[in-house]
Amino acid sequence: MPRIRKPREHSLFLKAFRAYLQYVNSGLYFRKEHVLGLENVPSNGTPVIVVANHQNCLNDPLCVCLQLTDRRMNFLARANVFKNPIFNKALRAMGLLPAYRMGYEGYAAVSKNQETFDAAGNALMDGETVMLYPEAGHQDKRWLGKFKLGYLRIAFAAAQKMNFKEDIVVLPSCNHYSNYFHARSEMIIRFGKPLSLKPYYERYQEAPRETMNEINKIIRAEIQEMMLHIEDLQHYDQIDFLRENGYGRKFAAENGFNFNYFPSRLLSDQKLVAALQSATESHPEEMESIYADTEKYMNELKRLNIRDWLFMANPGVESILLRALGLLIMLPLFLVSIVPTGLLFLIPKIFLKKMIKDQMFVSTFNVAVSAFVSVPLCMILPTILIWIFAGFWWALGYFVAFPIMFILVCNYMRMCLKFGGTCAYVLKKRTGEIRPLKKLRQSIFNRLDKLIQD
């Protein structure tokens, strides 16, 4: 019987590279990462397949990898990113394996997946962790697609090679983002209850397909329960708007959730989406009217270049003056900070429109460019030069100040956007364009309250 070996150790280079990526991803790009359910993760050395929803390309596996630093991680990724020989070698060194898809690489290439499945199975036999996404592609919405059975084929094939003597665990997981595209947003990584495959070994040997389908339903249901799953794709934009803005905040407060704490907001959003779905089923005509008015409201906001939060704040001229004063006071700090950090904002924008066709790659592209281009040019190289020409302490000061300057610039630009929105709101209020929009907003809220309570 094949013997389960000890998981491979990370090389010193890989440990250093992971620490660097942790700094770029968790320290700079994301404002906060909430990791829930870590107690459900089996100990290192246990053969584990992590299965998750897929909504943000490279960020999904990267964030999980940077949290589970105690183990050797292996990921299945789309095969086209392995075309470049240098990338191929680097990605494989980091534990990525190519997955060939009929719709992208063609039927002939799919046969190459057997080599990938064998490598993933060997990793499990070594007591390592394999992560993959059964949807076989990322979504562009907060929605869970159908699951393919590849992850279970890998698991049971490895179990068979071990004569069904050793257990393999499937660990359901989910990712959830406050914003798919903007830096300094928040995300949630949540691990569900692990499922041992050992109790299914005997049934699998008698009816493999039926057994895998049964397990697949269990795993998918648990992931769907952990994440925000908006099933009504016909009204997706309206539902997503309602739960992100004023009505979502109001619903959270009325139901005992903290809208400003992201994990609590996810629970509130799940409850709100379920309530909207139930209301749509019981009152289809009324909800259709509400969704039509919501779309009208969204279009008007876009036309007037204002945001929904302004109706809650209801700013006046004094708010414009206070925001202008705050921006003026912070301007010197912004100018000092934008000089060393500017490339972090400029470089991605130069190439983004030309290179990225799928919007769900925007965040991945920003993190990758930051890690391999912007941060080395803006932080690492200047730190070395300052050390050479000015001394260690000046270099250390610059190194420590760099993330603070980056965060300050991000916040300042966000304040500028809010200032512009405040000015537009006050101006439109004076012209009388806000009043009918405010009335429409209140009508939507009142009708929703009535239907949801029913």
Image: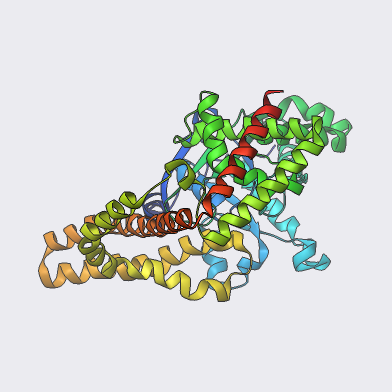
Task: Tell whether 21 sits left or right of 63.
Answer: left
Q: Residue at x 39, y 56 (%)?
A: 414
Give the image location of residue 12, x and y in percent.
38, 54
The colouring scheme, among rainbow, by chain, secondary structure or one colour, is: rainbow
Q: Is residue 378 above or below residue 229?
A: below
Give the image location of residue 1, x and y in percent.
70, 37
Q: Residue at x 61, y 36 (%)?
A: 445
The count of marks equals: 0
Give the image location of residue 345, x and y in percent.
40, 67
- Residue 402 visible in the displayed image: yes
Q: Nearer the viewer, residue 453 or 229?
A: 453
Quadrant location, the C terminus = top right
Residue 358 in which image quadrant: bottom right
Q: Is residue 77 above or below residue 266?
A: below
Q: Is residue 112 above or below residue 203?
A: below
- Residue 227 visible in the displayed image: no
Give the image location of residue 107, x and y in percent.
83, 65
Q: Nearer the viewer, residue 255 or 156?
A: 255
Q: Nearer the viewer, residue 235 or 355?
A: 235
Q: Residue at x 66, y 33 (%)?
A: 448
Q: Nearer the viewer, residue 159 or 258?
A: 258
